[in-house]
Image (tube, rainbow, N blue to C red):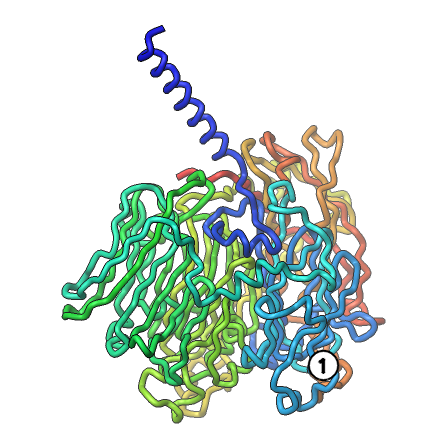
Amino acid sequence: MNKFIVSIVIGIITITTTLLYAEDSCNELPVVPVGFDAYKMWDKWPQQRIGVRAYMRSTYDRDGGNRTADASHYLFGNPDEQNVSLDVKGKGVLYFFRTNHWHGSPWHFIVDGTDNVVRESATADPVDAKKKFTKTEFIPTETFPEPIAWTWSTTKGADLIWHPMMFEQSFQIAYERTFYGTGYYIYHLFSSDKNLSQPLKTWSVNNRPDPEVLALLNKSGTDIAPQNIAKIEKTVTLDRETVTLAEINEPGVIRAVKITLPLDEALDLERIRLRATWDNAEHPSVDAPLCLFYGAGTFYNRDEREYLVKGFPLNIRFDYEAKTIELGCYYPMPFFKSAKLELTGIEPGKTELRYEIRHEPLTVPVPHTSYFHATYKDIPQPEAGKDLIYLDTKGIEGRDEWSGNFVGTSFIFSHSGYLGTLEGDPRFFFDDSRSPQAYGTGTEEWGGGGDYWGGLNMTLPLAGHPCGTRNAKDAKHEKDLIQSAYRFLLADLMPFGKRAVITFEHGGENLSTEHYEAVTYWYGFPAATLVKTDVFDVGNLQSERDHNYNSPNASDVETILSRYELGINKFPEKPWGMNDEQRAKFQELTGKEVFPAHEEYGRHTDGTSEFTATLMPENHGVMLRRTLDYSFPNQTAEVFVSVDDAKTWKSVGIWYLAGSNTFYHSYPKDELGKRTPNVMTSNRRFRDDEFLLPEEVTRGQDKIRLQFRTIENEQEILPGVPFPKPSRWSELKYEVYCYTIQRQ
C-alpha cells in the first residue's frame, strides 16, 4: 500500500481514537480530592465537584439576632454535660472547626459512634487564661500541630483546626462547657464514594496529619507554583490608563501572577485594578483593586512587618532592603482558548513595575474544570435590614447559570477604624435554596479571629486580619483606619451546581452604615451541573396525583405561617453596638417588620411516604431538596429507591436533620460553671434540607420511586426534658436535581 495512504489511514485512526478518548474522559466523573489529598492536590482547586455538598453550621442565635455574640446555642444536651452543636449523618469529612479561644473545651468529636476528646492547654486552668498563658496548643498536640491547627495565642482570639476528619456514617460535636461556647464548622457530604481520591475511613484522635501537607502549608508566603513552565517576565511603565501584561493564545493554566511594586509609590498604586479575561469573553472574570485582590484593604503597613498577607494562595511581602512590595497569586487559572491579563485604572506617569506570569498547558477535559473569578463589590451605603451581597452568580458576565466552587473572600469592613461591624453573620446560599447551607457566627470568626482579634493583626495560610488598628485614636495614618480580613477555602471549599449567593450581615442586626468592599474568589463554568427535573408540591392534590403520592399515616394538609432563618423580625428599639446619636438615625425604623412571615402548606407522618420522581437518564446522581416544618425535632427517615415500580427497594441511607426550632441557650456566669440551659423556641419553622442519591441507583433512569420510612427518634432536648413535639417526618415540597457533566 502507498506510504502516503498508509499515513493518512493511521492519522485518521489516531484522530478518531483521540476524539473517542476525549469524549469518554468528558463523560467520566472527575476525581474528588478528599482528606489530606484536598491539600496535596491543590492544583485541582478549579475542578468540578460532582456529587459533593458543603455545609457550614454554627452556634448562631436561632432568633436571628446576636444573643451573646451568637455563642452557646445548642441543638440538644446529653448526659455528662455534653452540649451538642453539630450532628450529621452520611458519608463525609469535617474540614474545619473553630471556637472562641478555648471556650467549650473539652470538645467531643463523636465519629461513627466513637467519642474522641480534644482539649486545649488552657482547659485545666481557664479562669483568666489570657493572663496565665502566652502560648497554648491543642491536646493531643501530635494530631493538631501548626500549621494545620492554630490556637488563640497566634490567631489573636480563636482556636482553629483544618485537620480533615472522615466519617462513614455519622459525626457529632459536643462541648463540655458552655460559657462563651461559640463555634462554626465546615463539612462535606458525598453522594457516593466511587470517585473519591481515597476511601473514607473513620477518623480517630490518634490519626496524625500528613507530613507532606504540613510542609506544603508551611510554604505559605513563598512561591508555591511549578517553576519549570512557560514564563512571561517583564518590566512595564505605567504611562497609560491600561497596560497589557500578557496575552496567551493557546489552552492553558496560569499558575503564578507576581507583581513587584516600588515601596515608596505603593499606596498610590494600591487601587489600580488587575483584570483577567478568559477566551476572548465580553466581560473580564477578574477585575479588582490590587490591594484587595492580593488579600489586604491597603498596602499601608503600620508595623513594618515582612508579610502583610502570608497566605497560601495569595501573599503581600515587604522587602525593605530592596524597597519593594512583592505580590504573589497562586490560584490556578484555567482557560480553553486564550487569556489576557491587564492593569487598568492607572493614572499615567513614569512609574515602573516588574511582573512575572507563569503558565502551563491545560491537561484536563474542559467539562471537568472551570474559570477563576475575583468579583469585586463596592458597597458604600448598606441597606438597613438587608444582607450585603458580595456575590450572586446569576447574571454574572451575562450568564444565568454557573457551576463551580466558592473559594474565599478578601473584604474591607470599615474605612473608619470601627470593629463593631464584625458582629455580622456570613450566610451563603447555593442552587436556589431558601435556607443558607452556610450560616456563621460573625465576620471576624469567618476571618479566623475571635473578639475582633483584640484589635491586633495576624496572617495565616487560610485566614487573617492583615490591616487596621485597634481604634481610630491609635491610627498613625489615614489608611490605618481601613479594616480588612481574608478567608481562603481550600479543602473546605463550597461547590455549587447552578448558582452561588454569598451574603454577610452588616453588623449584628444589619444596621451598620460602614463602607464595605469585597473581592469574592470563585471558580465557575457558565453551565449547570445541577439540573432541576421535578418539583413535588405536597398538599397540592393535583401534584400528589401526578407523583403517585402514597403516605397512609400522613396528616391532613396543614397551612403554616412562619419564616426561614434569615435575620431579625423587626428593627430593634436599641440596635446593638450603636451610640445614642447613631440610634437616632434609625428611630423611624423601630418596630418595623424586616423579615415578614409567609404561608406554606404540607403534611407530616410517623409512617412511610412515597412518590415518583422524574430524572434525566444521563444523570450522575441526584440531589433531593425538601422544604419542611422544623418544629418537628430530629427528623429521621431511611431512604429507599425503586427502579421497577416498587417491586424491589434499595436502601440508600439515612436522611437526618438534627434539632428543631426549639433549642437551648446556656451561658453560665463563669468558665467552670455547669450548663444553665434556657429552652427557647424561635418563630422560624421553615427549613430547606438536602439528601444525595448515588448514581448507582439513578443512572439510566427517567423515573424512580422514592420511599421514606420514618425512624422514631427519641432524642430529648435535655436529659429528662422532651422536645415540645414528637419527632415526625415533615414534607412541604420536594425538588429533584440531577447531577450532570457541564456543557456550555
- Write down the quadrant of residue 15 in the picture: top left
Name the kind of residue labelled 1 in the image.
Thr
- Write down the quadrant of residue 470 in the picture: bottom left
Give the labeled residue for mark 1.
Answer: 123
Note whether 57 is above or below 443 in the view shown: above
Q: Secondary structure at mark 1?
A: loop
In-image side of 471 versus 635 (left or right) = left
Give the residue drawn at x 69%, y 82%. Answer: 122
Please state which of residues 427 and 369 is positioned toward the viewer in this rendering. Answer: 369
Residue 390 in the image, given as x and y percentages of width and height = 41, 64
In-image side of 148 versus 513 (left or right) = right
Residue 275 in the image, given as x and y percentages of width and height = 28, 58
Give the residue drawn at x 76%, y 49%. Answer: 710
Furthest residue toward top: 1
Please state which of residues 360 and 416 is positioned toward the viewer in this rendering. Answer: 360
Q: How many marks?
A: 1
Residue 172 in the image, given as x and y percentages of width and height = 72, 63
Note whether 713 is above or below 708 in the view shown: below
Residue 619 in the image, given as x and y percentages of width and height = 55, 36
Please say whether residue 604 is visible from this viewpoint: no
Please say whether residue 102 is visible from this viewpoint: yes
- Write down the quadrant of residue 517 in the picture: bottom left
Give the residue drawn at x 26%, y 68%. Answer: 272
Q: Quadrant of the N terminus?
A: top left
Furthest residue toward right: 720
Note whether 463 is above or below 216 in the view shown: below
Please rate how many residues cluster around mark 1, counting C-alpha atoms within 10 Å: few if below 14, some from 14 to 19, many from 20: many
